[in-house]
Amino acid sequence: MGESRASETTNRPLADLDDWESVHQVSARDETGPQSTFRDYRENVRAGVREFYQLNHRHQTLGFVLEKKQEFLAKSRRSMGIWEAMEFLNTLVDESDPDADFSQIEHLMQTSEAIRAAGHPRWFVLTGLIHDLGKILCLYGEPQWAVVGDTFPVGCRYSDKIVFSEYFAENPDSAVPEYRTRHGIYAEGCGLDQVHLSWGHDEYLYHVVKDYLPEEGLAMIRYHSFYAWHHENQYNHLMNEHDRRKLSWVRAFNPFDLYSKGHDRPDVAALTPYYKDLIAEFFPAQLAW
């Protein structure tokens, strides 16, 4: 199946797979300060994030995205349940980072426990638990820049609100006239489900679980890394009314995704029965991955 541990994967500039989110954590802190400091992440960003986005913006072309959809959306690599997928993701260990002492399951439970504590519905809690399971792409040998990072539309003009947008100058699609227009290959109001976003764990997991969760939860999974849309109000011309209804749910999810990490370590053993019951409420015993 071409699986490999994270430490054996090439093109891995991030010390931790979650480091790419640091640009948004910094910008959110700065948002309450002077306007001159808003989104001033370039001096504060963690080591490796800049290199990560250079690779991501250089290689995420429309052709690459279509190739990866064909490769992975057949979902023919494994058959496993949600809890088994969580245990599989738990084998994703970054041996180069001595401070990464939380397991992947603990990180997943941090998000879901914060959502549960806020009193949200059970499907919302479950969405928080599973939203990053698509990162098992790393265990198939995929490089970091094809698994995590901000997502953005391909096949049309890149917004300058996308983080490190200057690196799109290295992307071959930047030289394609059709892809440099506002709409590109898309039509006004076509709907985001008709738009190809850069490839990563969001899109992959969406297709694995799309038959089992409410559409609000599916929107959270599919678009939680689409910061140019839900945080910067870009690409609204491609939305339809259905997308406008989903946007509020994606925005409601985002703080739990960003700010629950690093909280107290959850008691996995004590929480396991609750989460196994929750998973069984929505999902079959086996899914195609």
Image: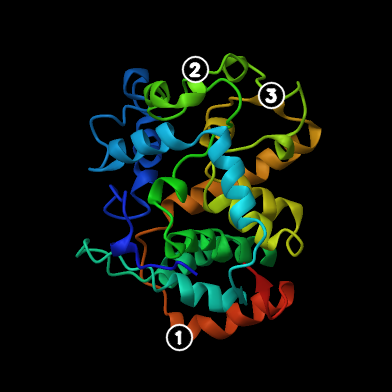
Amino acid type at circle 3 is Ile
Name the quadrant containing residue 90.
bottom left
Seen from the viewer's position, the closer of residues 34 and 39 is 39
Amino acid type at circle 2 is Ala
Which quarter of the rendering shows the C terminus?
Answer: bottom right
Q: Is residue 266 left or right of residue 123?
A: left
**Residue 155 at what x, y percent from top left?**
61, 27
Circles 2, 1 touching at the beta carbon (< 8 Å) = no
Seen from the viewer's position, the closer of residues 196 and 103 is 196
Q: Residues within 10 Å of mark 2 (few under 14, many from 20)?
A: few
The residue identified by callout 3 is 185
Res. 117 visible in picture = no
Does residue 7 sit above or below 186 in this rendering? below
Discs 3/1, front: 3
Decide which of tag 3 and tag 1 comes sooner along the chain: 3
Q: Residues within 10 Å of mark 1 (few under 14, many from 20)?
A: few
Decide which of tag 2 and tag 1 comes sooner along the chain: 2
Q: CA distance from mark 3 to mark 2?
A: 15 Å
Residue name at image x 67 percent, y 72 percent: 287
The residue identified by callout 1 is 269
Discs 3/2, front: 2
Name the quadrant containing residue 196.
top right
In the picture as drawn, the residue positioned furthest to the right comes out as 241
Does residue 9 sit above or below 273 in this rendering? above
Q: CA distance from mark 3 to mark 1?
A: 49 Å
Q: CA distance from mark 2 to mark 1?
A: 53 Å
What is the number of the mark on residue 115?
none
Q: Is residue 91 left or right of residue 49?
A: right
Q: Secondary structure at mark 3?
A: loop
Q: Secondary structure at mark 2?
A: helix
